[in-house]
Image (tube, helix red, strand yellow):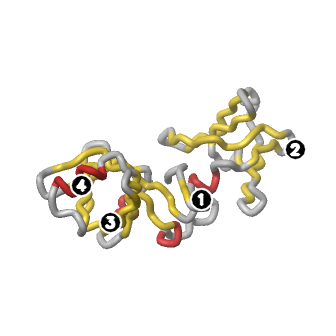
Amino acid sequence: MSSKSDSGNRRIAIGKIIGTHGLKGGARVYSWAESMDSFEKGTQLTAAAPGGDIVLTVQSAAPHKKGLLLTFKEVGHINTLEPLVGSELFVDRDDLPEPEDGSYYWVDIIGLRVETVDGVFLGTVDSIFPTGSNDVYVVKDGKKEILVPALASVLKEIDLDQGTMVVDLPEGLL
């Protein structure tokens, strides 16, 4: 899931409108969500448009090339959608399911203080990227950067309430 959020993590960015599709106002969307479930029919998304936020209700969603094609109940023509191209799409955090045990939304991981099992401070999680087999946390402390694989053998503890992550890095990563 996305690493972007606003309003104290109440809204989470799950995609961006990157273009139009057809005269009826279909939207080409680049998705940051891990599954299509975030774009089910009836889901309300907020488009952060230049003129102000606009609430859109998903009417249909389908995979398309490296993204999605979405239609919205409120959009019936390309002229209505064109001003929204480039807008990020947010979902209200309360509308998301709770992650399974041991799973977290990226927005919850970004900003955590990271230290080793020996108590050595490594920095904070600055960003996350998927590799296919697992995510990798980019931990920064000033100009120093460490890539931490999100593996059970490496991640020893994540405490969202305390804002901390404890890791046991394999030799060579530190």
Q: Residue furthest right?
A: 118
Q: Are marks 3 and 4 in contact (CB under 8 Å)?
A: no
> Given the image, on which type of amino acid does mark 4 rest?
Leu
- Helix or strand or loop: what does disc 2 sit on? loop
- Return the residue at label 1: 103
> Given the image, on which type of amino acid does mark 2 rest?
Gly
Mark 3 Cα shell of 10 Å, populated few (<14), some (14-19), many (≥20): some
Q: Give the foreground label among 1 and 3.
A: 3
Q: Are marks 1 and 3 in contact (CB under 8 Å)?
A: no
In primary-sequence order, the first of circles 2 and 4 is: 4
Q: Are marks 2 and 3 in contact (CB under 8 Å)?
A: no
- Return the residue at label 3: 56
User: Is 24 on the left or on the right of 2, as rendered?
Assistant: left
- Helix or strand or loop: what does disc 4 sit on? helix
Q: For the residues marked 1 and 2, what is the alpha-carbon distance in whole angstroms?
A: 23 Å
Mark 4 Cα shell of 10 Å, populated few (<14), some (14-19), many (≥20): many
